[in-house]
Amino acid sequence: MQAISYYLLLPLIYFISILPFRLLYLFSDVLFLILYHLLGYRKKIVLNNLSNSFPEKSSQEINQIAKEYYRYLCDLILEAFKKITMNSATTLKHCKFKNEQVLNQLFENNKSVILLMGHYGNWEWAGSSFSLSCKHQLYVVYKPLSNPYFEGLMCKTRTLFGTKLIKMQNTFKDILNNKDKVAAYAFIADQTPSPQTAHWTTFLNQDTALFTGAEKIAKKYDFPVVFINIKRIKRGYYEINAELITDQPKTFEENKIIEQYAHKLEKEIKIEPQTWLWSHRRWKHSKPRS
């Protein structure tokens, strides 16, 4: 069944990938009508997440953000398909690095880095742009898809322009094997960890669990930590900003690095909330009682 669904959808995916951008976004407008108005895809989750994150906003404001979010989500889905056939020039035109010199200076100093980012902006295009703009070998830590056919397509797409992947369950082992190489390890760190092993903080007005693995790796190997923000400038165009959190991670108290990351991501979400992944069940776990 997984193979059947993959091969049925594959021609459509490639057709979307070769569309000119103008037609791609017309297609996205149609997809918006289907997801938002006809299907109401995860609308209850989105509205609940937004209401809990912004208790000061009216229901009208929440509904407006939700609507803008679904427009962004439809763009994001089709942009991921578009990536399959985007060349290097097109990639850099639509997703530019604002200050890659921050990272390239660390490379010149022979420093591997930990990149902390969120499901904000277009993280798929950003991976390609990083590999085209920066000197570090990029490794993206990711969670494999359950469908092996789509997993293969995703891996092929994400490894364009030299990016390499590390499965989440292999993170510590693979970084240990590569620790003598100058590399950048990207963590999309706003996912939902096990509540028992997570660090808990207040994020968007809610008790929120955070992964601690990236911080532990940074401290163990003395890797600088950089926050990556992907800002949407206008439809189909993004700008990547690299902000150094620390180049001395061992001097930080436990969990303070990941706290700084959460604070920076929260700040960006509040500026442009519609470009964060609100349809994810980010707060499905409750904070364990002490």
Image (spheres, grey):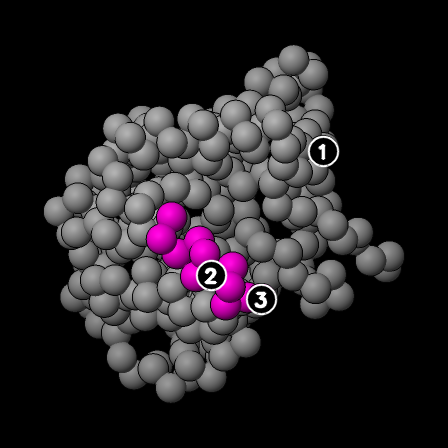
Q: Amino acid at mark 1?
A: Lys
Q: Which residue is depicted at the point 50% across and 79% down?
A: 170
Q: CA distance from mark 1 to mark 3?
A: 29 Å
Quarter of image, res 223: bottom left
Q: Amino acid at mark 3?
A: Met
Q: Which residue is depicted at the point 44% across and 53% down?
A: 9
Q: Earlier in the sequence, mark 1 or mark 2?
A: 2
Q: Which mark is residue 1?
A: 3
Residue nearer the viewer, 252 or 66: 66
Give the residue furthest to the left: 89
Q: Earlier in the sequence, mark 1 or mark 3?
A: 3
Q: CA distance from mark 1 to mark 2?
A: 28 Å
Q: Which mark is residue 6?
A: 2
| Residue 277 appears left or right of 141 | right
Position of residue 272 measured from the top left corner of the image (x, y, whole percent): 47, 28
Q: Residues within 10 Å of mark 3 (few under 14, many from 20)?
A: few
* Residue highlighted by disc 1: 44
Q: Amino acid at mark 2?
A: Tyr
* Region of the chain picked out in magenta, as a range: 1-12
Asked if one can make out residue 65 in the rendered structure from this viewpoint, the answer is: no
Give the residue furthest to the bottom: 177
Q: Residues within 10 Å of mark 2 (few under 14, many from 20)?
A: some
Find numbered disc 1 in the image and state the secondary structure of the residue it sits on.
Answer: helix
| Residue 250 appears left or right of 253 | left
Q: Is residue 178 above or below residue 33?
A: below
Q: Is residue 33 above or below residue 205?
A: above
Residue nearer the viewer, 217 or 192: 192
In the image, residue 274 lies in the stretch drawn in magenta: no
Q: Is residue 271 above or below residue 261?
A: above
Q: CA distance from mark 2 to mark 3?
A: 9 Å
Position of residue 130 measured from the top left corner of the image (x, y, whole percent): 25, 55
Q: Which residue is depicted at the point 56% across and 33% down?
A: 35
